[in-house]
Image (cartoon, rainbow, N blue to C red):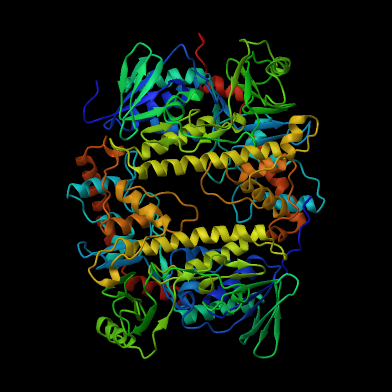
Amino acid sequence: MTSLDDPVRSVAVVGGGIVGWSAAVALKRRMPGLAVTIVATPPPANALADHMAHTLPSVIGFHDDLGLREEDAVLRAGGSWRLGTLFESWSQQHPGYVHAYGPYGQPFGTASFHHHWVRAAHAGSAAPYDAHAPAAMLARAGRIAASEPEPGSPFAGIQAGLVLDVDRYRAMLEAFARHLGVDIRDGHVTQVRLRGEDGFIENLALDNDSAVEADLFIDAAGPEGVVRGAIDARWEDWQPWLRCDRLLAAEGPPTAPSPLDQVTALPVGWRWRTATPTRTLHGLCYSSTLLSDTDAHRLLAEAGGAETSAPPIAFTQGTRPEPWARNCVAVGDAATVIEPLEWTNLHLAHSAIDRIVAMMPGRACHPLEVADYNRQAAAEVTRVRDFVLCHYATASRPEQFWQPAIDLPPSLAHTLALFAERGRLPFFEEETFARDSWLAVLLSQGLLPRRIDPLIEATPPAQSDAAMAGFRAAIASTLPHFPTAAQHHAAQLGRIAR
Amino acid sequence: MARPDRQRVVVVGGGTSGWMTAAALVKLLPERCHVHLIESESIGIIGVGEATLPHIRAFNERLGIVEAEFMATTRATFKLGIEFRDWGRIGDSYIHPFGTFGRGTGDVQFHHYYARLLHAGVQLPPIEAFSMACTLARTNRFALPSSDPRQIASTFGYAYQFDAVAFAPYLRRFAEALGAQRTEGKIVDAERDGESGDVTAVVLEDGRRIQGDLFVDCSGFASLLIGKTLGEPFQDWSRWLPADRAVALPCRTATAVTPYTSAIAMPAGWRWRIPLQHRTGNGYVFASAFASEEQATDALTAAIEGAPMATPRVLRFKAGRRERSWAHNVVAIGLSGGFLEPLESTSIYLVQQAITALVELFPEHRVAPVDRDEFNRIVDMEYDRVRDFLILHYHATLRDDSEFWNYVRTMPIPDSLAEKMDLFRRRGRIVKYREGAFLDASWVSVYLGQRVTPAGFDPRAAGPSIESLIAGMEQMQAEIRAAATAMPDHLTYLARYCPMPTAA
């Protein structure tokens, strides 16, 4: 029988942003036998996963696994719901579109819904693709589903993400961590001491002259990789594909709240605007080689009416091909730096934390177990990168920033080639975004498959058109029954006030 | 006859693959293709895969085949899994079920808790006691699974054991009724376009030429188009899967009509036992390097349970697959594209996956490389994953009673499998896939059934107290037993649900 290394007894998390606190809480809660220490160094400004307010729906599952109730994790922490994103001006020949979470269209016949839509689009008779997505229409109407829609309703299966109040959310996690008994340490890591015999991390020296020992170290301290970087600095550079390297964010007073955030393409990048019930968030993501920081400030003020004196945040997109090495695993920006388009930053961090829990090796961090972790992590992050990149690869704008420069990564090139030819998405393991998400972006940005799928030839076009019109009508007739975002927010405040 | 706007699909060879392909194409792509199948009664069919995987039900459903009618026609029985006898060690027996261990829900898989108790020295029954499918199988009971996920009776799936020789004619009637054309004849040659190299026509013995736009090679081991005409290289996997012969011999059923297939290890391979309604199929899959055809035939004849119903028939094959199953305008489906012994009943599954991929990637008149590449990516992945799973059965053994078992026990195995086994041996980890024929519970059943035991377990399984785990397991076992006891005997259920025609 294989002799096995002893179990991990202790974990030290470095990083006091929402990624670090999420990791500390998840490990302590889901593996109660572990001694968990957090070195709660405030994360640098360029730790995007620690600062971006928008999340994907996966955050809800993460809360559920921790036993966090909606009242505590969302309402009392100042969070609000988001159903999707309105993308504007990404393709100049096509109107803006909504990428929301949940089904697009209703299956009928033996083939996927979108093949029927593609045929109608070829015939020039298609309504916008997102008009067939209940969540997208709900979001456009500024409304929210207060409770889980009944099975069978067109609105069944829609999902919502969150817009966090990052400071309050972090405070909520910190309080929860204290409650769970996480050992909380302040200070900064000044030195990572490696063991002579195997190069494992022995301990971390802090600037207050104390040291932190643990069997396993989680680097959640931002893109510098202060801990993980002590082992190796291998890095996969995505800049040839993803050219944004600056972020400027601002906040303004509240306006009419909406569950739909706006993401608008600009000549040198894109900007966002999100109206939560308590404030309006603005931001700009751009390439510093094409736009000066001064101009960025001016552009954001003009576009959003919001000003900030903070300097832009500089970041370099890419990933560690092996986030886990020896007894150290990087999460958040220490593992992957990606622009916040589609709000994947915290999702990737949460997913990594879930994976650490599910694949926890022993104290020896056996290379096979670590390799299996890295294989899954790489498969996931590659497809998230592909999804973000597909927005650019299929955009259509005249400016220099938007011109395709070099070959796409093979996995995305294959995806786009197969899709452009016949509307099929190839299968990949560890895909984050559902097929409906890919379809929403690709079809709405104008990547119309050249061929109509032969599987729908048995259904006459008139029948497809009638089914699509019927589905749109069913959505439209149900919409008015949902509360507006403002009504929903008021009802929620009532709930926690009781 | 052929409409000019339709693509002419020529299916080369009848049999299970050929008629499954023809039936799916005429049913699902009626406007797109004209299907012309050529087969020769003088060649005969292999009739592989009398035992199937649960995926076959989705295929039948998509075609609109009524289950009870299909089962009656093919004299089918239900299949809840495969019993493996004498694999880990002589005298061992375990069932690889179509279903979960435990409820199959929850963050931490059941086998981690099971392993924890074993490590604590708790006496436990084999893990199959916690599987609804295994419990039903061991007691020869069957009823369709519950669709209510709260019921323990929802935690299993099922497949069929059927007469493959009756399946092809059944599909033929189906396909011909929907417009498939059939030509009797023996193919002697194929013509290719001088420029593109694509196949343009096949030539029959009597001189007839049958032209097509797309050719599906279902010619079995003959591999007429993908092999002989196009010369697509064959990846030989026989160093890991040395069995290269099978001798088949059906007999009268003398014991139970079990709702499972048996795979019984033999000195130079293994033998199958597949009970149908009217007979029991038997066969000995063996490596000719370790046993002669005569020895194998004698061993099989001695082992079968009832009077033989035919003379023994020997098949020859080699494990492996074509480098590309789709090359030029020729798509190989079935044995022409690859062969993996029927140890896990994957033959029809692999045919079905290839057909599904072809339907969903059906080309235009001129084949686009992107369709072909995606098809090959899918088919290769399926083959490669099944391959590792099969090798595991041979390699994970303590048997040292024959040259054959000494070879497979000590042979080098593919890295991809060695890593999977090491991960399980360490902490009971199953390498995670979302796609592929065999997912977590399948790997767990073979590992544990063949004495590959984990040294540790998921640390989260250390959470609950030993006492609470024992109590939970006892309760689950009782619940499974009660649910199984409430179900009828397999034969009784068959007689009510899908009795074979009496004239058969």
Residue B355 place in picture, x, y as percent: 42, 34
Asked whether residue B399 appears in the rendered view, the answer is yes
Name the residue located 43 percent from the left edge and 69 percent from the top edge: A55
Q: Quadrant of residue B320?
A: top right
From the viewer's perspective, is A196 left or right of A53? right
Name the residue located 32 percent from the left edge and 82 percent from the top edge: A254
Name the residue located 56 percent from the left edge and 42 percent from the top edge: B385
**Exactly how many numbered labels are in the figure?**
0
Residue extending farthest top = B503
Q: Quadrant of residue A103?
A: bottom left
Is residue B179 positioned above or below B5 on the image? above
Check the picture and name the quadrant holding the N terminus of chain B.
top left
From the viewer's perspective, is B169 left or right of A170? left
User: Looking at this view, is B93 or A256 the one in front?
Assistant: B93
Residue extending farthest right = B121
Residue extending farthest front = B194
Residue extending farthest left = A124
Residue A297 place in picture, x, y as percent: 31, 86
Asked whether residue B153 appears in the rendered view, the answer is no
From the viewer's perspective, is B135 left or right of B385? right
Residue B424 place in picture, x, y as percent: 68, 50
Name the residue located 42 percent from the left edge and 31 percent from the top edge: B230
Is residue B209 positioned above or below B140 on the image? above
Residue B197 place in picture, x, y as percent: 35, 33
